[in-house]
Image (cartoon, rainbow, N blue to C red):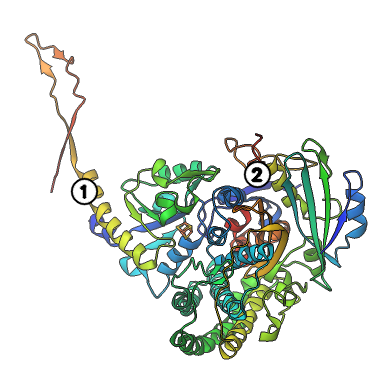
Amino acid sequence: MFELKKFRKKSPWILHFNAGGCNGCDIEILACLAPKYDIERFGMINTGNPKQSDILLITGPVTKRTRERLVEVYNQMPEPKVVVCCGSCASTGGIFRGMYNIEGGVDQFIPVDVYVAGCACRPEQIIDGVVVALGILEEKTKEIEKTIKLANKPVVEEDGQVNRRNMPAELTYETTV
Amino acid sequence: MKQQFEIPVGAQHISLLEPLHFKLTTENETIVDADANLYYVHRGIENACVTKFKYRQVPLVVGRVCGLCSVSHGTAAAQVIEKLTKVEIPLRAKYLRMLVIELDRIHSHLLCLAHVAENSGFEALFMQTMRDREYSMELLESVCGNRVQYDYSIVGGVNRDLRPDVAADIKTKLALLKPRVQALHEVFETNWSLSLKNKGVGAISKELAMKLNAVGPLARAAGVPIDVRNETEDLLPWKELGFEMILDTAGDVYARNMVRIKELYVAFRIIDNILNGLPEGDIANISKALPEGEAIVRVEAPRGELMHYARGNKTNVLERLKIKAPTFSNVGAMVEIFKGNQYASAPAIIASYDPCLSCTAR
Amino acid sequence: MNKIETTLEKVSSDIGSFYKYDQHHFIVMNANDLGDKIEVQWFFHDYADAKNITMFWLQCADTDRIPSINGSVASAWVAESEIADLLGLDIENAIAGFVLEHDSPIAPLRKKKK
Ligand code: SF4
């Protein structure tokens, strides 16, 4: 049996998307992949394929032309997924806030889990943020792996008819392990 | 007629740092036509510089145009405003600006070389080059206080002096870096499998490069003698510090690698000369004059010629600021070079342009 | 910098006779909003003496059709499309929507009419 849980925790694959920043934070992400900071020791690899990645690293404020691509890339990623914003301008818009072609921070379009501050954010900070993201990824994985049960059982009336007026629309989550 | 396919590269792609979209039309494996969609990162900085920010803040804002050559942008904007306000800056400030621009060039060229290696499928060389690049990042941090956005040039000079211990640090670290760059040079020059992906790939002739007005290493690799450092002695005295233009003739990916590596040696020499001959004096000359008139300034950024045009009307806010980034001039050539190459070489060719779309789109 | 004034009718032929691809480098095309008029500028420098910058300029109304110089300078379309979008000018052969999205403001670099 694959110990899928264990392996996913050990090697989250990251996807890097620039939503319109100045490249400053992007080259710091590249520096993270390089020998000095080396986030590959956490098992992370930079992938180009959203369908295989677990962590989405976003840099830069969202511009009017990238927002559709951002949402699309996010939607293509499988659950569980974690979104990390690198840099001030991805978090809030930063220095670009209020410029005419800027929509603002990334969190206006997709849910963000970790914000990394700084212009540009240092590689140490990115590593910190990604390690926090690993914890969140694990929690989200646990959340997904809970079994689901219907909360309301249908009522069986005296004549054997099933009463579906109380639709069992609520779900309860239980942990298996 | 053979069947043609359209293959998109981008907007998000592993070989691209930034959103950029190429539509390549291919016949079998050969690219016959290319189309580019560049303005994904258009933010409106030119407008913000003339409405939201005062002219003293402009060098810091235009630094955010591009993180790779932020000091070139900042210096160009500071210089153009100094021309408008008619401020003479101290010689020491000029030398310090050149020092940071050259350090920036080292880190940018090494990044580009690493990227070419990675996109040609040579991951180990990518790692090595990135490791050596960290020397220049550490030096930039110790000189300016930040790894990427330096905010070093301000209107009237620079905002930090060079401490003697930092100067000594630069010398020791560069002495470590030089032999490593020589080793990299050897790999890039002689490695057989890299040459398969680089030699004769993505070539452009001198004539075409001139017709399409290419700039920077892309043009110099084809033999076009264009380098702003060759001419602007009045603003930054490059020539007296041992600047020398590097030219190649082949115009392919390999020639671009060679031009970039040889420019590293020039940068080392200029930095050595700056450290040995750094004049004493103030680092900034802050005046209260307001910008008036119009001026243009050209600076050689790592990717080529950068031009800032500004116009002032004796108020605290500029009237117009136009930024012409190096990649902007290269767009025509970039689209042209693809034609006739294999689709599999496209990532390496894109990396060898060293495109900077956030400069182009602003 | 030598400034050469030209007009809307003459600009194509002026630049066409001036520009030799192996002698001059086309830097960029620029336009400024002067309030009631538009000033359009084309910058060139020489390869041999690169300090020598030549600027062609003209002034026109904002509704005039500005001719393209792409016939003589092969890479001018990028600059022309950008300026046409950012200042809302009518430039021959400019690609619409090159820079701006459909919901971006129109002609953001123009001054607000008071
Ligand atoms: S936070 Fe700063 S360095 Fe990072 S992308 Fe934004 S402007 Fe560039």
Q: Are marks 2 and 1 in contact (CB under 8 Å)?
A: no
Tell me the amino acid under the disc marked 1. Lys
Task: Name the residue located 32 percent from the left edge and 45 percent from the top edge.
Answer: A79
Q: Is residue B201 something that shows in the picture?
A: no
Kindly identify which numbered label has been placed on residue C109. 2
Graded by Cα atoms within 10 Å as few (under 14), some (14 to 19) or many (20 or more), the crowding at tag 1 reads: some
Quadrant of the rendered image containing residue A13 = bottom left
Viewer-side label of 2, 1: 2
Q: Nearer the viewer, residue B48 or B13?
A: B48
Q: Nearer the viewer, residue A140 or C109?
A: C109
* Chain identifier of the residue bearing label 1 in the image: A
Q: Position of residue A56 (x, y in %)?
A: 39, 53
Q: Is residue A20 something that shows in the picture?
A: yes
Task: Name the residue located 37 percent from the left edge and 71 percent from the top edge.
Answer: A38
Q: Is residue B225 above or below residue C73?
A: below
Residue wearing tag 1: A142
Q: Position of residue B8 (x, y in %)?
A: 60, 49
Q: Is residue B188 above or below residue B313?
A: below
Q: Mark 2 near ligand 1 (CB under 8 Å)?
A: no
Q: Is residue B227 above or below residue A131?
A: below
